[in-house]
Image: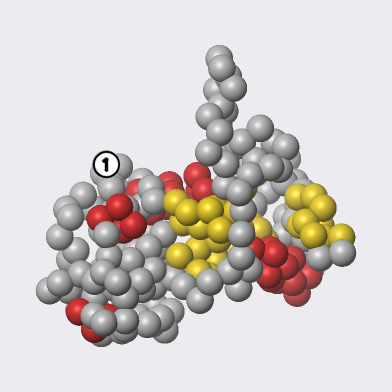
Amino acid sequence: MSWPDAAGFSNWMSVQDSLQPAYKFVDGQLHSFDSTADGYRLLSEAEWEWLARVAGRSEVSRFVWGNETTIPKNSGNFADQSAKGSVPKYIPRYNDGFAGVAPVASFAADVVGLYDMAGNVSEWVHDVYDLRPPRSGQVETNPFGGRHNDGRGDGRVVKGANFRSASITGLRSSFREGLLRGRDDVGFRIARYLYGQE
């Protein structure tokens, strides 16, 4: 699934629930994003990482399961013993029972009730993948999109480990990739803003 497919699904869900779509596409290309829309959208990179590292925890964690590099039993779907031979690297002495993608919610929810934050498939988020640092003297807080709000970058950000992940770096909640097109180990998670009565 590509990033436009995931954003398009968010719009489709919005229409199904009589909400205003957040993404506007023209000729199959993203034209604009309406941050005031009440419809569904992809999580921002900062939101995704906050859910994976901070929400419901007593301290910021390196991994969804905590700070230990030893993966607790049944923590998620990663490149485990059953994937040996089908992936370049696997996690010895860890077995989640799935060599490929597992059905959603095959593992227990995390501390705030979310499923599959630790592994199974990586997830598209809203942000443009951009490695440029903030402008000198400028502090940027959760720049929703391109770093300099120009929409430029190298693809879109993908967060989270997946069933092919085996390295400590790839399992960390802070790990990010930039992709131009979809892969069979990438999915998405949607959210929406809830606006209260003024």
Asked if one can make out residue 53 in the rendered structure from this viewpoint, the answer is yes
At x 37%, y 59%, the residue is 112
Place residue 86 in its image quadrant.
bottom left
At x 37%, y 82%, the residue is 100
Place residue 72 in its image quadrant.
bottom left
Q: Looking at this view, name the residue that lies furthest to the right.
A: 27
- Vertical position of residue 101 compared to residue 7: above or below: below
Classify residue 170 as left or right of residue 128: left
Q: Looking at this view, name the residue that lies furthest to the top.
A: 137
- Vertical position of residue 79 compared to residue 152: above or below: below
Counting from the top left corner in percent of width and height, residue 19 is at 77, 63
Residue topped by disc 1 = 59
- Label tally: 1
Counting from the top left corner in percent of width and height, residue 70 is at 15, 60
Secondary structure type for disc 1: loop
Q: Quadrant of the N terminus?
A: bottom right
At x 50%, y 44%, the residue is 46
Amino acid on which the number 1 mark rests in the picture: Glu
Classify residue 170 as left or right of residue 127: left
Q: Quadrant of the C terminus?
A: top right
Classify residue 136 as left or right of residue 25: left
Depth check: give the residue in front, 78 or 152.
152
Depth check: give the residue in front, 159 or 105.
159
Counting from the top left corner in percent of width and height, residue 36 is at 75, 46
- Vertical position of residue 99 compared to residue 183: above or below: below
